Amino acid sequence: MSKSRYPRSFAHPRYWPTWLAIGSMYVAAWLPWRLKIMMGKGLGLLAWRFAKRRRHITRTNIALCFPNKSADQQRQLVKDTFIANGIGLIETATGWCRNAEGLRHRVAYQGQEHLVRAKAQGKGVLVVGIHFSTLDLGGALHSLFYPADVVYRAHNNPLFERFMTRARSRIFGQAIDRHDLRGVVRRLKAGHIVWYSPDQDFGRDVSVFAPLFGQQASTIRLTAKIARMTGAPVVPLMFHRNPDNRTYTIECLPSFDGFPSGDEQADAAKVNQFIELAIRKHPEQYLWLHRRFKTRPEGEPSVY
């Protein structure tokens, strides 16, 4: 449903479930850490059991990307993915509703020198992150080290959009709508770090096909376009929940060499190589629940 079809007043009964969800997020954000993890696992298992459509999408993605895993291994990865993303909901609440300073002891930052070197060029830095379940908490923890702006997708629900944007604006320097290319370019040219996630399927019109886990994946061309327009170095960044479920690792890699190259497919392939590298470290933490391969090469049927 479009925003225009929502009631104007946030007191309208239609928003009461949203208010309840927001209140629940504030409560979850302040729970003891062990209870957070337990609650997240429970949410993930409920979704795994009852969200049949999402389970089918996840199972399809994992079968495509990990064909060498046995059927049992694939089923376990599907289940682990739901559990990790359930924990991710609680992590998102924590990132949005708490001051990240109180979580500093939970994060280690590796490879900071690569971001420092890129920023020293004076052209801004386009940080490429991807949609792990830890994404929003990762942004909050990253802000403890380096201020950054973020490119995001607006929510259809106006009340939740307001809550989400305010939370992200507190964490990041500026929350930029993904359709606001001028805003991204402006912030980079002003020397800012901009966090951007190019790992979803935005359709044929704005993408080229490039390999991802052996599949031809519709890959947005915008990463190279932004780099070309601004001269900003593109720095890949990974963020993972560690196996102890209590601490996190941010890992910055060297900026892409010779990027953009002028070859759209080669540039898209380079981005996907990083995405695949990051996912392989902790595949269960990736957002396999979205239809990453919904756009198919001409003549190929839907995989979903």
Image (tube, rainbow, N blue to C red):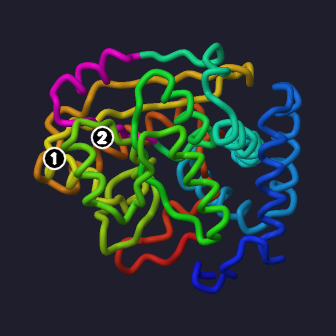
Disc marking residue 153: none
Please tell me whether mark 2 sits on a helix, a strand or a loop. strand
Q: Which residue is located at x 27 percent, y 46 percent?
A: 187
Residues tagged 2 and 1 counted as in contact (Cβ below 8 A): yes
Left or right, 42 with respect to 176, comes to right
Q: Is residue 296 above or below residue 71?
A: below
* Residue 246 appears in the figure: yes
Give the x, y percent position of residue 262.
Answer: 11, 52
Give the x, y percent position of residue 133.
Answer: 63, 43
The total number of labels drawn is: 2
Q: Is residue 217 above or below residue 149?
A: below
Which quarter of the rendering shows the N terminus? bottom right
Relative depth, front residue between 55 and 236: 236
Q: Which residue is located at x 26 percent, y 30 percent?
A: 255
Q: Which residues are magenta?
A: 111-129
Q: Can you name the residue that lies furthest to the left here?
A: 262
Disc marking residue 126: 2
Q: Is residue 217 above or below residue 236?
A: below
Left or right, 84 with respect to 223, comes to right
